[in-house]
Amino acid sequence: MTDLEPSLVLALCIFGTFIWRALGVAVANRIDISGDLFQWFNCVAYAMLAGLISRIILIPSGTLATTPIFDRAIAMGIGLIIFIVFKRNIFWGTAATFLIFLSFTASR
């Protein structure tokens, strides 16, 4: 193995990422955000996110698996309520969920 190989891999990764970003910039102006296709992609993205969050809460792995499901579910529920009360502000919902879960974990 030579010292050139990691540099070559890094350059190829940068190039590959740049191509997709440049393509996204070129196509972004042509996308109709109120169109059916865009709405479908938006729904798929939210569904994937909801599935990931559900998996993290119900079937956690690693250190999170050692915490009670009650703590995870209550923190998530209160965080959702905070999110809705604060006019769907993702920062306050996430911060509340984190702090509530942290306080449950610290109290045990």
Image (tube, rainbow, N blue to C red):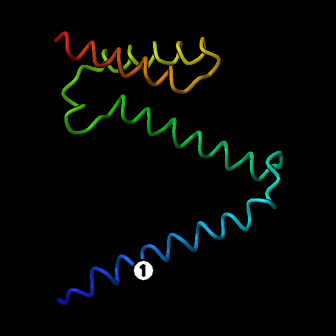
Q: Where in the figure is residue 101, as x and y percent of width and height?
A: 32, 18
Residue 86 placement, left or right of 67: right
Screen quadrant of the N terminus: bottom left
**Helix, strand, or loop for circle 1?**
helix
Residue 82 placement, left or right of 71: right
Residue drawn at (51%, 40%) of the image = 49
Q: Amino acid at mark 1?
A: Leu
Screen quadrant of the C terminus: top left
Q: Considering only vertical position in the picture, is 4 above or below 98?
A: below
Check disc 1: other Cα within 10 Å, few if <14, some if 14-19, many if 20+: few
Q: Between residue 3 and residue 67, name the one nearer to us.
A: 3
Q: Between residue 66 and residue 105, name the one nearer to us.
A: 105
Q: Where in the figure is residue 74, as x and y percent of width and height?
A: 38, 13
Q: Where in the figure is residue 64, as x and y percent of width and height?
A: 24, 31
Residue drawn at (60%, 16%) of the image = 84
Residue 69 placement, left or right of 21: left
Image quadrant of residue 60?
A: top left
Q: Where in the figure is residue 57, as x and y percent of width and height?
A: 36, 29
Query: Total of numbered circles in the picture?
Result: 1
Q: Considering only vertical position in the picture, is 81 above or below 72?
A: above
Residue drawn at (38%, 18%) of the image = 73
The residue where tag 1 is placed is 12
Residue drawn at (83%, 45%) of the image = 34
